[in-house]
Amino acid sequence: MPFLDVKVSRGVTGGNPRGGTPISATEIAADLTRLTNELLGKRREVTAVAIDWLPAEQWFIGGTTLAESGQRSFFLKIEITTGTNTKDQKAAFVAAVFAAMEQRLGPLAPASYVVIQEVSADAWGYAGRTQEFRYIEGRRL
């Protein structure tokens, strides 16, 4: 039941200074959902993705805007339940997300980040039940 919150810099695409489109948002969400399922073993049906597009003039790396540098970037924070993935799985996910985003957006600034935030099972859930509750219920069966 991961939640993926991704911020993507807009760029100049096809002469459109606004950059991202609903189609590219759909593609990014599909890529992230697929990678989360394949590499972290998370269920697609409870994987949520939110995408925000930010102007390149308001995104700074090293004190310079992406508009000035001509680069693109993204920041992804994914929240998963603590202890459900290995270091190797998380490393593979970070690498695959960077590659997928670069394929969609073009060359990326190296300071494009993926943050995997692990949350205690008793501190979050969905459909009104915590992950800890689901674990306990599963053990009783």
Image (cartoon, rainbow, N blue to C red):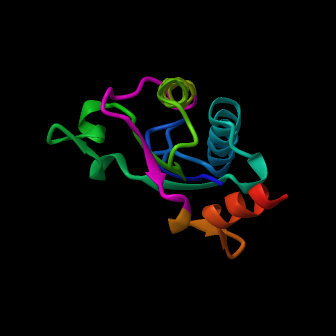
Q: Nearer the viewer, residue 81 or 76?
A: 81
What's drawn in magenta, residue-wise? 104-121
Residue 49: image location, x then y, percent: 61, 53
Which residue is at 62% across, 35% downward? Answer: 40
Quadrant placement of the C terminus? bottom right
Residue furthest front as drawn: 140
The quarter holding residue 135 reads bottom right
Queried whether the magenta region covers residue 109, the answer comes back as yes
| Residue 9 shows up from this direction | no
Quadrant placement of the N terminus? bottom right
Which residue is at 50% across, 49% downward? Answer: 82
Queried whether the magenta region covers residue 108, the answer comes back as yes
Residue 81: image location, x then y, percent: 55, 51
| Residue 48 shows up from this direction | yes
Q: Nearer the viewer, residue 31 or 141?
A: 141
Q: How many marks?
A: 0
Q: Is residue 106 above or below residue 52?
A: above
Which residue is at 69% across, 37% downward? Answer: 41
Residue furthest bottom as drawn: 128
Q: Is residue 82 above or below residue 138?
A: above
Residue 136: image location, x then y, percent: 69, 62
Residue 106: image location, x then y, percent: 49, 25
Which residue is at 33% across, 29% downward? Answer: 109
Q: Is residue 29 left or right of residue 11?
A: right
Q: Is residue 134 left or right of residue 89?
A: right
Q: Is residue 47 left or right of residue 68?
A: right
Residue furthest right as drawn: 141
